[in-house]
Structures are given as structure tokens and as C-alpha cells.
Image (spheres, rainbow, N blue to C red):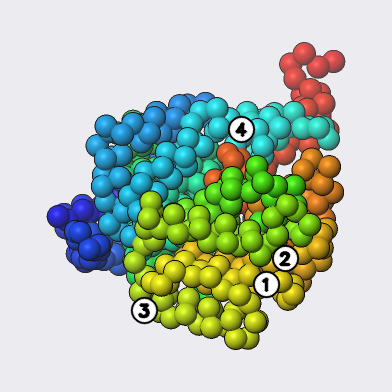
Amino acid sequence: MIERAAYLPGLDQDALEWELLDFATQERSIQVAVPVLSAAEVKVVTDHVRQQSQRTLKTYSTVQIIEVIDAAIARLLDRDDPYRRKMEDLLPVITGYDAEIVRLGLTRYLKTFRKPELLRFLAEDFSNPQILDGFQPLIKGGFGRAYGPDVLAHIWAGNVPGLPLWSLVSGLLVKAGNIGKTSSAEPLFAVWVAQVLAEVDPDLGECLAIMWWRGGTVGPETALLGEADVALGFGSSHTLNQIRLRTPVTTRFLAYGHKVSFSVISAPALDAQKVASTARLAVADIIRYDQQGCYAPQVMFVERNGAVSPELFAQFVARELSVGEHKHPRRKLDIAQQNSISSWIFDEEIVSESCVISDSSGTWAVSFQGEDLTFQPGALNRTIRIIAVDDIAQVPAIIRPFKLLLQTAGLAVPPDALYTLAAALGAAGVTRITALGDMTSPEAGWHHDGRFNLSDLVRITEIEARLPPAADKLAHYAD
């Protein structure tokens, strides 16, 4: 079968040149047709989106936009909806992830974009969300109004299914015309979302577009960045540097690059009644999408002096990874990824003198380090380094040298340690602290990499407090 991966209002799609991308598992294969766009065609689409967003989307109230998004999400949560069926059917083939992992992950993720959660998005960034609809009183005096960009460009990575939805929804909430460039690794999800939104509200559907080109293709990427008011980039440091070089100095560029996350497990979480549950939660964070998201743990810090030792806890983790492989098999890796895991295991055993537990086929690996406290990330794809610490209070000092790379910490700690540890982790660079087992499911409105999702996208126009009294002097009722 062939599925088209583009949503391009303003262009005749049948007149475009298309390229086929092949995806396959052991059971089946599909082809995805992606458009081969010129810089001129990209400009046609950006002009269309800009004009339509100025004509319609800018006139919508924020509540109207939320209602449209909520209706689209309700459809995508319905397993009988044609688009949801496509997602469940095709995304496992495209990404290689276990079908049940994809199904559960989609539901869990999509639920964070329903109306109540969208209202939380707005409230998190704006004390008065009506500032997006008209001038509102400012605390300092005067009035202010927030304006979203006419064209917001998204250049997405494809490591985790559904990633584009976060920034796309953020763009819609600030009334931006949205143009997204998908990854070759997963080019379809954003297209389906755009098509559902267009079916719910055809006018809003004219205010967004989904494109594709091979990563690093200069012509279309430069054209998009040249037309955008704000650009968002997701990917490796090299990718983001290339995007930054192509972005005009007048365009605001927000980069979301490689980050590292970890978990912290205290001694009270290791007693005889809790240890099995603790291990299951810890491994759930590893198995979901095989650690491909920045919020997945690569290192576990485990405290000594619990009923179960850190070394024995590593055995619990290994057992849960083995069970997880039977329930939700890891996706097939390419040669480079397999070699990366082999090299990591060799380095852990020989260089770091760690104890490594792995299965015979190399689908998972646990490295236990009882002496070396070095914060050293794993090889992803269900590999984890467990470091024993005498006290969880040691962790902030261990991770501090990596401050600019840190993102999420998943904690299994008692209440008396929670806020003290959280404060120290925040000072060391961590931007999100959550419960063990929830690392891969950020809450609605979370501050991605410690930043604001919505307010970073807008500009504020202010009416200074001295102007209304000055205007009063010119009123017909003035003395």
C-alpha cells in the first residue's frame, strides 16, 4: 500500500513530484509517498498559510481554537475513527515499535491535549489567557495583548511517535499559521492530525501545512526559515546548528536539542513489599519507545542500606527487562545501533569494570557500578547503567557537570526527601522532576527544557498606563 505524507493547502498535490519511502517489519511492508518540493513551492504554501491565518485564525477566540483541537483529539482517541485506525495500523510498521506500545502510548499522549488540559496549557503561560484575544490589564499598569507569529515553522525529529503534536498545538493556541517539516523516520502522524483538524474546521485547516524533505536539504528549508517569524527546531546538536545557520537573524529560533535524563531510587523504595513494583515502574520508563525520547532514563542512581541492595536491584531490573521483551519486543535495530550497544557493553565491562547483565540476543543490558560514580549515559534501546550511592543527596553533585544537557529526573523517594532533593536537582540543571514510571509522559503544560511553550512564541504589544488619561483629554466629554 502507498500512503501520502503531505498536507499542502495552496498547492495542487497531483501536480507535484513524489518520492517513495519504504518501511518494513518482518511481517509486512508499506510505502509512503513524500513530496519533492522546490523552494518556490514552499513559498507558495507559506504565503497561503500566512494569508489564511490572518484572514481567519487571527479572528478566532482562544476558546474557539480549543474547541476545534478538543474535537480533533476526541476523534483520535476513538479507536474506531479511520485516522486512529491508520495510526495503530501503520505507525508500528513505520517506527518498528511494538504495536501495543504504540497503541497505549498514543492514548496516553493524546489525552494530554483535551480541553481541560489545553486550558491548563494557557493558564501555565498566561495569567489571563484572554490576552491572546484582546488588550487586557497588566499588573504593572496599562494594557497588553499577545500576538502569535503569522508563520511558525516546525522542523521535527522522528524518534518518538506523536512528537509534532506538542508544538503544533502550541502554535494553534497562539493563533499562528503553522508549517511543519516531518522526519523521514516518521512522516505521517502530523499529516493525519492536520487532516483531522481540517475536517473538524476547514477554515482552520487552511492555516497549517505539513511538508517533507530530506534532512539538510538546503533549498526548501532555507525558503521556509526565510518566511517564518518564529522557527522551532528538534534534533541533534549538528542538525540544530545547521538550521540555525539557515535562519535569518530577524527570525526567532528556538532549539530543542539532545538531553539526558535519569532516575533516583531511595532505600525506602527497596523494601520487600515495594521493590518489585519499583523495578516495574523503572523499567516502564525504559521500555516505552526504547529510550528514544529525551525524557527517558539512561542512568539509575540507587541508594544503599535498603532491604534490597543496589546490586540485587539490578537483578530485579534485568528480570523486568526480560519480561518486557516478551510482552513488548524491542524494535529492530540497524547495524550502527547494534554496534553502539556492543561497544557500550564492552566499555562498561572492560573500561568501567562494571557488572553487566544482558540477554543472549542483546535486546537489553543492565550495567551495575558499585564504585565508580561517573554519570555516563547508556547506549539507549533498553540499556541502563545503575550506580550505587551511599545517599541520594550525592546525586546533584554527580550530575552537575552536565547541567546544560539535563532534563528529567524520575524519583522514588519519601516525602521528607522530596523537596530537598528536588531543589538540589533543579539547581544542578534538571528542568522536570516526576514520579518513577511517569518519565515518558509529561503533564499538559510542562515547561519543555525549562522554557515556556506558549509565551516564548508570542510578542506583546503594550498600551502604557499614561496613554488612556492622555486620550481622555481629547474625548468629546473633556472639559
- Of labels 3 and 1, earlier in sequence is 3
Mark toward the start of the polypeptide (4 vs 3): 4
**Element under disc 4:** helix
| CA gap, disc 1 and disc 2 | 6 Å
Q: CA distance from mark 4 to mark 2?
A: 38 Å
Q: Amino acid at mark 2?
A: Ala
Are the residues tagged 1 and 2 within 8 Å (C-beta)?
yes
- Alpha-carbon neighbours of circle 2 within 10 Å: few (<14), some, or many (≥20)? many
Q: Is residue 111 visible?
A: yes
| Residue drawn at (65%, 44%) of the image | 274
Q: Quadrant of residue 374?
A: bottom right
Tag 3 near tag 2, CB within 8 Å? no
Give percent across and percent down for residue 158.
41, 60
Sooner in the amino-acid sequence: mark 3 or mark 2 = 3
In this rendered view, identify the residue nearer to me: 233 or 439: 439
Badge 3 density bin: few <14, some 14–19, many ≥20, Cα 10 Å: few
- Mark found first going from the N terminus, 1 or 2: 1
Q: Which mark is on residue 53?
A: none
Which picture quadrant has residue 17?
A: bottom left
Quarter the N terminus occupies: bottom left
Provide the residue designation for mark 1: 369
- Which residue is disc 2 drawn over? 388
Quarter residue 31 falls in: bottom left
Residue placed farthest to the bottom in the image?
350
Q: CA distance from mark 3 to mark 2?
A: 32 Å
Label 4 Cα neighbours within 10 Å, binned few <14 / some 14-19 / many ≥20: some
Give the number of the mark in front: 3 or 1: 1
Q: Please give the name of the residue rendered at 34% of the width and 66% of the height, measured from the top-left corner.
A: 332
